Every structure is written in structure tokens, then in C-alpha cells.
Image: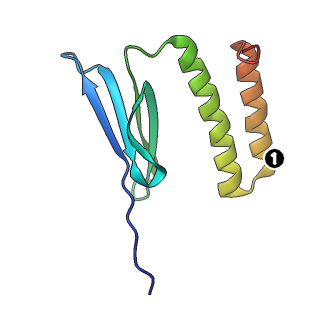
């Protein structure tokens, strides 16, 4: 039997007195990341017992709105790629990509 391997991803969030994130750092040693700063994060976890997703969405005070729009666009694109790998549903994946193009067009992200 093969040995089990554990991998750890750590998130550290520094909050102000109102519990608003000021700094976010993350570590994923297996991925070569140690205490890297981030301005935003989105984490989704599937609860199989409740059949629902649980989410954590955080961003720091320093996250500019224009960067947040790009972050959302890139996240939506990545989700469409992940959806394709997970389901092999080419039609819906293409539909999701079409929406990503529409999203970028409406926010003028393609001009960057």
C-alpha cells in the first residue's frame, strides 16, 4: 500500500479593530509558496453531508476595485476550465467562457 501524503495550505488574515482584513498571507510549501501576500481570496469547500458549498471571500482594504474586476474575471475563467476538467461538459464550459468574454467586454477588461 502506498504511503499517504499530506499537504497543507495556510491562510493568515490580519484584521483591524472592526474585523476588516488589512493583510492576507498564504503558504503552500508543496507549491513553493511561503508567506506570500495577497489582496484577496476566494475559497469554496463542498460539504457532502449538507450538499452545499461553503465559501470564504476576503479582500483587504488595499484591494483596488479595478484589480477586483480583473480578479473576478480570471477566477471565472479558471472556474470554467476546472468545470471542463471535472465534468467533460464541453458545451457548458464553452457557455461559461462566452459569459467570461461578455463580462470582460462590459468591464472593458480586454483593452488592458
Vertical order, 46 against 18 (above or below) = below
Vertical order, 24 against 11 (above or below) = above
- For the residue pair 44 and 1, the one nearer the viewer reads as 1
Vertical order, 11 against 48 (above or below) = above
Q: Position of residue 24 (x, y in %)?
A: 35, 29
What is the count of numbered marks? 1
- For the residue pair 89 and 25, the one nearer the viewer reads as 25
Vertical order, 12 against 103 (above or below) = below
Q: How is the image coloured?
A: rainbow
Q: Secondary structure at mark 1?
A: helix
Name the residue rendered at 37%, 14% in the picture.
61
Q: Residue furthest left?
A: 17
Q: Give the left or right position of residue 80, taking residue 19 as reference.
A: right
Residue under numbered circle 1: 91
- For the residue pair 95 and 68, the one nearer the viewer reads as 68
Q: Quadrant of the C terminus?
A: top right
Q: Position of residue 37 (x, y in %)?
A: 39, 30
Name the residue rendered at 26%, 26% in the picture.
14
Q: Position of residue 33 (x, y in %)?
A: 43, 44
Image quadrant of residue 70? top right
Name the residue rendered at 74%, 57% in the picture.
88
Q: Residue furthest bottom?
A: 1
Q: Quadrant of the N terminus?
A: bottom left
Q: Position of residue 110 (x, y in %)?
A: 76, 18
Name the residue rendered at 48%, 51% in the picture.
31
- For the residue pair 105 and 62, the one nearer the viewer reads as 62
Q: Give the left or right position of residue 109, taking residue 75 as reference.
A: right
Amino acid at each position: 500500500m502506498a504511503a499517504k501524503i499530506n499537504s497543507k495550505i495556510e491562510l493568515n488574515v490580519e484584521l483591524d479593530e472592526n474585523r476588516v482584513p488589512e493583510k492576507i498571507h498564504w503558504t503552500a510549501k508543496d507549491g513553493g509558496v511561503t508567506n506570500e501576500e495577497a489582496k484577496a481570496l476566494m475559497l469554496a469547500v463542498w460539504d457532502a453531508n449538507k450538499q452545499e458549498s461553503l465559501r470564504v471571500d476576503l479582500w483587504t482594504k488595499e484591494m483596488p476595485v479595478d484589480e477586483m474586476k480583473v480578479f473576478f474575471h480570471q477566477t471565472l475563467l479558471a472556474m470554467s476550465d476546472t468545470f471542463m476538467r471535472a465534468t467533460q461538459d464541453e458545451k457548458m464550459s464553452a457557455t461559461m467562457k462566452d459569459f467570461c468574454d461578455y463580462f470582460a467586454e462590459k468591464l472593458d477588461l480586454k483593452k488592458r
